[in-house]
Amino acid sequence: MMKINTTPILLFGESIAPGENKTINVEIARLHTTTKLNIPIIVRRSKFEGPVVLFSAGIHGDEINGVEIVRQLIHRKINKPKKGTIICIPIINVYGFVNKSREFPDGRDLNRVFPGSKTGSLASRFAYHILTEILPVVNYAVDFHAGGASRFNAPQIRIAQNNPDLKVLADVFDAPFTLYSKNITGSFRSSSEKMDVKMLLFEGGKSLDINNTIANEGVNGAIRLLSHLDMLDPKHTVVSQKHKTIYIEKSGWIRAKCSGLLHDNNTIGKFVKRGTILATITDPYGKFERKVKAPNDGYIINANHSPIVYEGDAIYHLSNALGEEGE
């Protein structure tokens, strides 16, 4: 039997009681035109005790695919919990979202300035408020991202190694791929771990793009996670994957050996054999064509969709690679 909850939670000075739904419009700083710019935080609480789950996106303002996933969770009322509390922040970096930019207006990457500072840069202040106002009440989180700089990520969860709790959650989320990835200093994920918040990082798609397949993977993974936590409203259906998530411990980038036009052969998410032609790089004048071949067997977990590349550009992220670690 579920236990009735009587304890309100406090976010940015506003109290949300059990059974209450509330949107908190947070204003950290106005635009340079003095126009207000609010960051909506959507909170839905059950009357019954349970975990607090955060679904967030848009920490990089141009990674719109993650925004679409959280939007669907709200629109389809998946964020209405059977027990516990679900907090949704569809756009953390609303300033970058307005400008279709990865960074904050101060030029900083929000995902490199955590835990932030109350009196620091705009990005640093925002990181500080997230950590001090939201994370203290959160038990579990999924932060949704997309590939930057025209790089298309196959749908994947990233977790640090040697964390059995996150391994269980990654199995439950069951994205097509799960990458073991070190926590980056200054990242939201790194600070979450220090605050004992169990966070999965989802990557899928590319910047300034909405891909329905990627969005479906993110939404279905969130549904499976909520079902595992016994928070999912019974009206929602859990969609199981045909195959269990593929764990990737080692990977590396294939880099362009020359500059030119990149003709991609659409191998993203596929298993390729050594020697498979992944793309062709040509010059604009018809003088040469150079093939890009897989140096080893593995899965293509990221592909550069830019039509123009320069020598040394990262163009494919391949599992089990012998070269440098993934970026």
Image: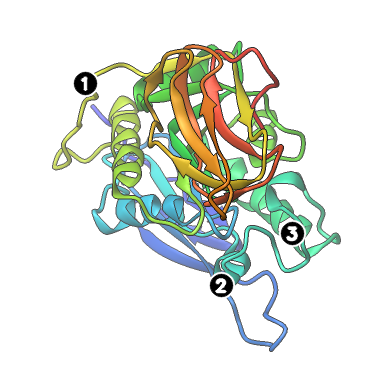
Q: Name the residue under label 1.
A: 242
Amino acid carrying mark 2 in the image: Val
* In-image side of 158 versus 110 (left or right): left
Q: Is residue 241 visible?
A: yes
Badge 2 density bin: few <14, some 14–19, many ≥20, Cα 10 Å:
few
Which of the 4 image quarters holds residue 33? bottom right
Q: Earlier in the sequence, mark 2 or mark 1?
A: 2
The picture places residue 305, in percent across and down from the top left corner, at 49, 47
Q: Quadrant of residue 1?
A: top left
Q: What's the CA distance linking mark 2 and mark 3? A: 15 Å
Q: Tell me where residue 23 appears, x and y as whole percent.
A: 43, 65
Q: Which amino acid does label 3 sit on?
A: Ala
Mark closer to the observer (2, 3): 2
Which quadrant of the figure has residue 250?
top right
Horizontal and vertical percent for residue 157?
A: 47, 29
Between the C-alphas of marks 3 and 1, the distance is 41 Å
Residue holding disc 3: 123
Q: Nearer the viewer, residue 22 or 326?
A: 326
For residue 48, above or below residue 322: below
Residue name at image x 53 percent, y 29 percent? 292
Q: Earlier in the sequence, mark 2 or mark 3?
A: 2
Judging by the rendered image, the residue that carries numbered circle 2 is 98
Q: In this view, does 17 lie to the left or right of 289?
A: left
Query: What secondary structure is marked by label 1?
Result: loop
Image point (53%, 12%), residue name: 296
Mark 3 nearby-residue class (10 Å; few <14, some 14–19, many ≥20): many
